[in-house]
Amino acid sequence: MFKLKFLIPLGLFIGLVSLLAVGLKLNPREVPSPLIGKPAPTFELTSLQEPEVRLSSEMFKGKVSLLNVWASWCVACRQEHPYLLQLAREGVLIYGLDYKDTRTAGMRWLSTLGNPYQAVAFDEDGKAGIDWGVYGVPETFVINKQGVIRYKQIGPITPQVWKEKIAPLIAYLEKQP
């Protein structure tokens, strides 16, 4: 009885310390997305540049592509943007989702900083972003030829992230039927 009285609190303490130790090793920027391995959420939004044109999730089918979620008010998006321009020049297929922004500000952003996107969907109220699980910008999704999300990058794409995570995945997906 006397031993049990001390073993239970000791066991609880060891368990708590173990959980905290595991938690300290996790990267808070690597939040797993429940959408990985699932079809890209369907949407139909107007084009940022041409409001009369409708863009939908069908634009991802048939080719490996990126969907970059950005906004003109986002500081990290500004840091990422020159690298996106470089990737686009290298032939990477990038689509944009202008998230919780104004059309005027988004247009000014692209005309001032350059446009790396094949097309930009305009998500003024953020509803499409919610369907995609966006909780901050920038976020980038890698989508395979069947329109299935294979990876989600939270935060800016950097040369290191590109080299270590995204480029190898795209190379692998390009070889798939």
Image (cartoon, helix red, strand yellow):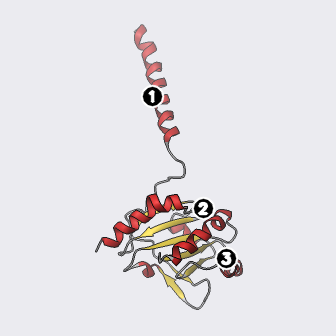
Taking depth in this image into account, of 55 and 131 the one nearest to the observer is: 55
Q: Image height check: is 66 above or below 21?
A: below
Which residue lies under the disc numbered 2? Answer: 136
- State the CA–CA distance, disc 3 to disc 2: 21 Å
Callout 3 crowding tier (Cα within 10 Å): few <14, some 14–19, many ≥20: few
Label 2: which secondary element? loop
Q: Which mark is residue 113?
A: 3
- State the CA–CA distance, disc 1 to disc 3: 52 Å
Q: Are marks 3 and 2 in contact (CB under 8 Å)?
A: no
The quarter of the image holding the N terminus is: top left
Q: Is residue 55 left or right of residue 61?
A: right
Q: Are marks 1 and 2 in contact (CB under 8 Å)?
A: no
Residue 113 image point, x, y percent: 67, 76
Label 1: which secondary element? helix
Q: Is residue 156 left or right of residue 5?
A: right
Quadrant of the image occupied by residue 155 = bottom right
Which of pointers 1 and 3 lies earlier in the amino acid sequence? Answer: 1
Taking depth in this image into account, of 129 and 92 the one nearest to the observer is: 92
Residue 157 image point, x, y percent: 54, 63
Which of pointers 1 and 2 lies earlier in the amino acid sequence? Answer: 1
Amino acid type shown at disc 1: Gly
Callout 2 crowding tier (Cα within 10 Å): few <14, some 14–19, many ≥20: some
Q: Is residue 5 left or right of residue 51?
A: left
Residue 128 seen in render: no
Amino acid type shown at disc 3: Leu
- State the CA–CA distance, disc 1 to disc 2: 33 Å
Taking depth in this image into account, of 172 and 38 the one nearest to the observer is: 172
Q: Measuring 47% from the left and 37% from the top, which residue is drawn there?
A: 22
Residue 166 image point, x, y percent: 45, 63
Q: Image height check: is 31 above or below 129?
A: above
Amino acid type shown at disc 2: Gly
